[in-house]
Image: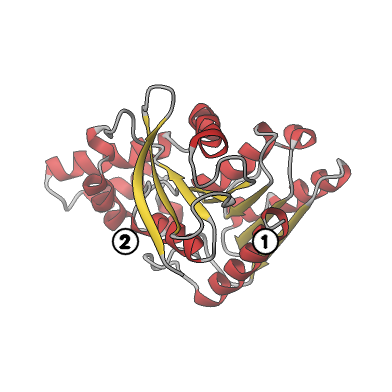
Amino acid sequence: MGFVSEWVQYGERREYTGYAAKPVQPASGLPAVLVLQEIFGVDEHIQDVADRLARAGYAAFAPDLFSRNGQRPAHLTPERIEAAKSFMEQLPSPGWRDIHVRNQALSVYPQEQQNHIMETIEGMFAATAPAQHLEQMLATSRFVQEQYAATKGAKFAALGFCMGGALSGYFAVHEPRLSCAVVFYGNPPAIETVASVQCPVIGFYGQLDTAITEKIPAFAEAMKKHGKSFEYHVYDETPHAFFNDTRKSYRIKASRDAYSRSLDFLNRHLGS
C-alpha cells in the first residue's frame, strides 16, 4: 500500500511537531495511531514504525516530545542523541542509569565529548516521566480528532515503546476518547490509577527485562479487579527493546509475534 509522510506543526500556537504517515487513499476517515517514542526521540526507528502502520491502513502520528516551536534543545538534537545512543549501546543496559558505570566508560573520550554525551543522557532520562508530556499528548489527541483531515472524527489508539510505552498506558488513564492502548516494554500506570483506565490495553514484555516485567502481574490483577481489559505477553529469554531493529537488543521472533498481535488488537478496536 502506498503512503505519504510529512512533519506537521500543531497545537494552539503551532508549538508542537509530529511525524505523520498515512495511506495515499482514502483522504479522510482513517483511524489514527499515536506512535510514542523511546528516549531516543522520533528517530529512524519510530518513523519506520509509523510508516509500517501507514502501510497497514492507519494514519500514524508520532509527536516529537523533545521539540518546541520547531526546535529541540541543543543537547537533544538528533545528532547529539545518536552519539549518546552509540555510547549507550556499548554498555550493559543495567549500566545505563549507573553513573559510575557510565563515567568509567566515558573516561576514554575527550572531555568535551564526555560532557556532551553525559548532558544528553541526563536530558533523555529526565524526560521519561509520563506526566510531563500529558499536555502535549492531549493536544495531539485533539489534533487528530478535530483538525487533521485524514483522521478527523475517527477512532484513535496509542502505541508506545519504553518511555512511550509507559506514556501509552498513562494516557489510557487520562484520555477518555482513546479507543485502545498498546504498550511495548513500558512501566505500567500506578496501581492506584487503574480504576480510571479508559480503554482496553495490551502489553508486550521481555522476560529478561525484570525491572519492568516483574511489575506486570500485579498490574494485571488490579486491572482484573476493576473490570478492565488487559492482555499481556512475556517473551522468554528476551531483553528490553526487543522490537527495535536498529539495536542489538532486537529479537526477530518476539518482534514478529508482538507486531502481529498489535495489528490484530488495533483492528479489533479501531476497525469498526
Q: CA distance from mark 2 to mark 1?
A: 38 Å
Q: Position of residue 206 (x, y in %)?
A: 59, 63
**Which residue is pictured at 38% across the width and 58% down the height?**
4
**Which residue is pictured at 34% across the width and 60% down the height?**
89
Q: Residues within 10 Å of mark 1 (few under 14, many from 20)?
A: some
Secondary structure under the numbered disc 1 in the rendered image: helix
Q: Position of residue 128 (x, y in %)?
A: 47, 38
Please say if 20 is above or below 271.
Answer: above
Its colouring scheme is secondary structure
Find residue 84 and name its label: none
Find residue 267 and name its label: 1
Please say if 95 is above or below 127.
Answer: below
Find residue 90 and name its label: 2
The answer to whether 154 appears left or right of 250 in the picture is: right
**Which residue is pictured at 81% across the width and 43% down the height?**
222
Q: Position of residue 122 (x, y in %)?
A: 35, 37
The answer to whether 119 appears left or right of 145 in the picture is: left
Q: Amino acid at mark 1?
A: Asn
Residue at the limit of the structure toward the bottom, as seen here:
253
Q: Amino acid at mark 2?
A: Gln
